[in-house]
Structure formats: C-alpha cells, structure tokens
Image (cartoon, grey):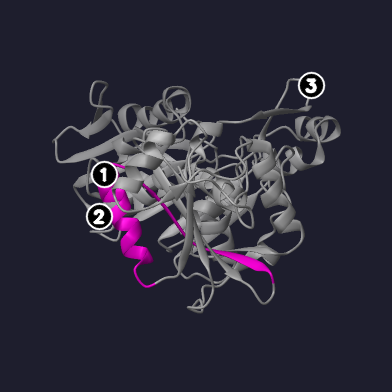
C-alpha cells in the first residue's frame, strides 16, 4: 500500500495526503498533466489514484497504464496498481496472463503495458491513461504517439510521470510545448526533497558526490544536457526552424535507412545562397514491402527537385538494388564510416549550417537521446547506446555524409 498517500480508508472513502506538487497535479484539469520531478518524489504512487479518479469521472470501459520497460512494469508500476485497485479499493482483480486489472463486475479494464513493446499499446480504445517513467530511453516517441491514438476517440486524458533522463521527445513535445503556451499541457516540476518523506540528508549527500548535470536531472527534476550526448552541439534555440515553403529551385536529397521492420527516411533541402541545409521531413514506417516504401517516397518527391537518394551500409547492396528496381536510384553513401558521418553532422551544427524543421518530431527525439555509454567510473566510452534503434539518425548520416561528395551507384 502506498502509505505516503493513503492515510485513512473507511466506508469506501480514501483520504489522501498529497504534498504541494502532487496537489497541483491533482487539481489540474488540462488534458495532459505531466509530473517531471526528482527520483522518489511521489510520482508512481500518485498515478494509480489519479487514474482511479478518471475512472469515476468517465465510467466503465478500457483504461491504459504504461511504463518504460517490462522490468519497471514488474517491479514498480504493477505493485503500485495492485496495491490501490486490489488491496485498497478491493474492486479489481489482476489477470496476469492478460496483464490487466479487471473490475469485479467486468465492465472496466485497466490494460497494463510496457512502452518497450509499443505494439501492445495498440490493443484498446482507452478513456484515460497514465504514462509512467515516460522520460526513460525505452519510452520512445512511437509509444507516446500510440497512447494518443488509443485516447483519440474519447479525447481522453493522460498523466505523464517521470524523472528526466535525456533531451528527447518528452522535452520537445511536452515540456517545450508547455513553455510555448500549449493549452492542453501542464507541467509540474519539483525536487525529490519536496516530498516530505524524502530525507534531506540523502539529497545533500547525492548533491555532493554526483556530477551536477546528473544531480539536476535525477534529484531536481530539471532538464540538463547529459554527458555522452553525441549531438551536443544541437541546440533547440539555434537549430530548430519553423516549417516554411521551400523554394522549388533548392536541390534536395534523401537519406534512407533500410529495415525489415523500420525503414526511415530523412529529407534535406539546400539553401545554396547561404550554404545551409534544412531537414524538412522524416519518416519511420514498417509493415510495407520495398515496392510500397519506394512508391510512398516517390509520392513525396513527385513535386520536389530530389537531386539524389543515399542509403544503407556498404553491405546493403541488395536493398539498394531492390529500391532501384522499384524506381528509386539509391546510391551508397559516400562516407560509410559511422564516426565520420557523425562528425559531418556535428560540424554542420557547429557551423550553424544545418537546421531541423520543428515538425520533424522523430528526428528531434533521436537527436536528444543519441548518446555514448558511460562506464561504471563515469567515463564516456566510444560505444553508442542502443545504436541499432536510431534509424532516422542513420538516414541523416547517410545523406549528410554524401553532400558535396560523388557517390557510386548501388
């Protein structure tokens, strides 16, 4: 039982003890309240009660509770949800095989899922949802988009709760939009120590021994640029451009990252007068054949001056041949080395010659999470964390590494 919140339960009434940060989130009526706070500040223990209130408001039906990974689901979210709905309210039963809590009358289901398997989030039309630890690397943009799709029919609300871990979609799509005045979003930030149950001595101890950037995220709940971030030269204030109509005279290039499940494209236009590049479109799609992917890309390019298509690792000759057969002459990237391609992008950002349309949410998410592994001693290693999951950045690397360099066909 989350004793930090529940103080009394008699005659089917629960009295909750909320600290000021939790109270502000409880009182929020906006569609997407987001608690972005320090660790152990009372996020996950708050979420089940928030969802329970939404069930009282919206009535019987399906609801959704998602967390970043299966381990977090087992160790954190599931125990909190069962404590409230099974042991305190005593009106729900957990069905382990289906991973859902079902009301005793069978009219209400709470579907429990992991964001690391976003396909599982597509299983219902939900009236409300909670997204727990949605700032973690495993909780990607496609999972957040899937949750919104599940809520769209009922225009349901979603509570987001997390400690900040990176500068990905949570910052660009939630925090930054809130700062810009989005009426659907309200962000609540507070420190670990703002939870009265959190020891002040522990807060001060960690402040004294942790790197300042990490402490700011983990215990103060504020976004900072983490160590190991690869595209650290990318700055929203400098490199984000609002979409505009690109002149037909500007040449354009497309980078493609092939994949059986995820095929990504990144579209770049060149302002030749100022020697600057603009990423104006990104895609990440699966479940289609090469012919279908190629046809969709050609549909985009129908009224655009696409100068060249680049894609794939040196070994992916067959994939380039398949696209060529489907009508798209994809060339091998001029620069195949990963680090050299990354350096090309970093250099263009530093020179203020590469800009990204604000509408490219997927690429922006990847730019804010693409990082090198930090070892047990706090040292940055050369290894890229989860490198195989950054399809849009690979596509961008292929095209940027080829600009101004002659590439061989196929």
Report x, y in % for residue 359. Answer: 48, 64
Q: Which residues are magenta?
A: 275-303
Q: Is residue 231 left or right of residue 119?
A: right
Q: Residues within 10 Å of mark 2 (few under 14, many from 20)?
A: some
Q: CA distance from mark 3 to mark 2?
A: 49 Å
Does 213 appear above or below 372? Answer: below
Secondary structure beneath dot 1 equals loop
Find out whether residue 82 is within the magenta segment. no
Residue underneath mark 1: 288
Q: Which image quarter holds the N terminus?
A: top left
Q: Which circle's residue, 1 or 2, is located before the other in the chain? A: 2
Q: Is residue 281 above or below residue 378?
A: below
Q: Residues within 10 Å of mark 1 (few under 14, many from 20)?
A: few
Q: Residue 58 — which label?
A: 2
Depth order, front residue of 200/294: 294
Per the model, the C-alpha gap separating discs 3 and 1 is 44 Å
Tell whether 80 sits left or right of 243.
left
Can you tell which mark lies on residue 377? 3
Q: Is residue 207 left or right of residue 105?
A: right
Out of 355 and 88, give the one closest to the viewer: 355
Q: Secondary structure at mark 2?
A: helix
Residue drawn at 69 percent across, 49 percent down: 344
Front position among marks 3 and 1 = 1
* Residue at figure coordinates x 42%, y 26% from the top left: 70
Mark found first going from the N terminus, 3 or 1: 1
- Frontmost of labels 3 and 2 is 3
Of circles 1 and 2, the one toward us is 1
- Residues tagged 3 and 2 counted as in contact (Cβ below 8 A): no
Is residue 152 found left or right of 239 in the rendered image?
Answer: left
Q: Position of residue 328 (x, y in %)?
A: 36, 53
Mark-to-mark CA distance, 1 and 2: 37 Å
């Amino acid at each position: 039982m989350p004793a930090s919140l529940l103080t009394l339960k008699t005659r089917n009434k629960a009295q909750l003890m909320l600290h000021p940060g939790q109270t502000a989130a409880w009182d929020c009526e906006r569609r997407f309240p987001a608690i972005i706070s320090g660790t152990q500040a009372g996020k996950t223990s708050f979420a089940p009660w928030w969802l329970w209130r939404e069930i009282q408001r919206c009535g019987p039906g399906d609801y959704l509770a998602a967390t970043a990974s299966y381990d977090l689901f087992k160790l954190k979210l599931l125990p909190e949800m069962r404590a409230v709905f099974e042991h305190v309210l005593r009106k729900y039963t957990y069905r382990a095989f289906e991973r859902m809590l079902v009301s005793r009358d069978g009219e209400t289901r709470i579907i429990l899922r992991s964001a690391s398997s976003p396909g599982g989030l597509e299983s219902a039309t939900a009236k409300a949802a909670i997204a727990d630890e949605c700032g973690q690397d495993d909780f990607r943009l496609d999972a957040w988009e899937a949750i919104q799709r599940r809520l769209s029919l009922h225009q349901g609300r979603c509570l987001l709760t997390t400690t900040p871990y990176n500068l990905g979609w949570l910052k660009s799509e939630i925090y930054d939009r809130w700062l810009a005045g989005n009426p659907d979003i309200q962000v609540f930030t507070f420190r670990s120590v703002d939870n009265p149950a959190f020891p002040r001595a522990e807060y001060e101890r960690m402040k004294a021994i942790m790197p300042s950037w990490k402490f700011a995220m983990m215990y103060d709940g504020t976004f900072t640029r983490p160590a190991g971030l690869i595209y650290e030269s990318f700055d929203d204030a400098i490199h984000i451009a609002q979409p505009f109509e690109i002149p037909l005279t500007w040449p354009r290039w497309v980078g493609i990252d092939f994949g059986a499940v995820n095929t990504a494209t990144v579209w770049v236009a060149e302002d030749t007068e100022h020697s600057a590049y603009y990423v104006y479109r990104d895609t990440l799609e699966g479940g289609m054949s090469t012919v279908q992917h190629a046809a969709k890309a050609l549909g985009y390019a129908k009224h655009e001056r696409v100068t060249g298509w680049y894609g794939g690792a040196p070994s992916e000759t067959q994939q380039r041949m398949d696209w060529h057969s489907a009508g798209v002459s994809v060339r091998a990237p001029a620069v195949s080395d990963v680090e050299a391609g990354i350096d090309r992008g970093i250099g263009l950002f530093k020179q203020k010659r590469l800009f990204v349309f604000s509408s490219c949410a997927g690429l922006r998410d990847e730019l804010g999470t693409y990082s090198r592994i930090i070892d047990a001693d706090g040292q940055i290693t050369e290894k890229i964390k989860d490198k195989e999951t950054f399809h849009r950045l690979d596509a961008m690397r292929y095209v940027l590494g080829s600009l101004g360099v002659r590439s061989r066909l196929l």
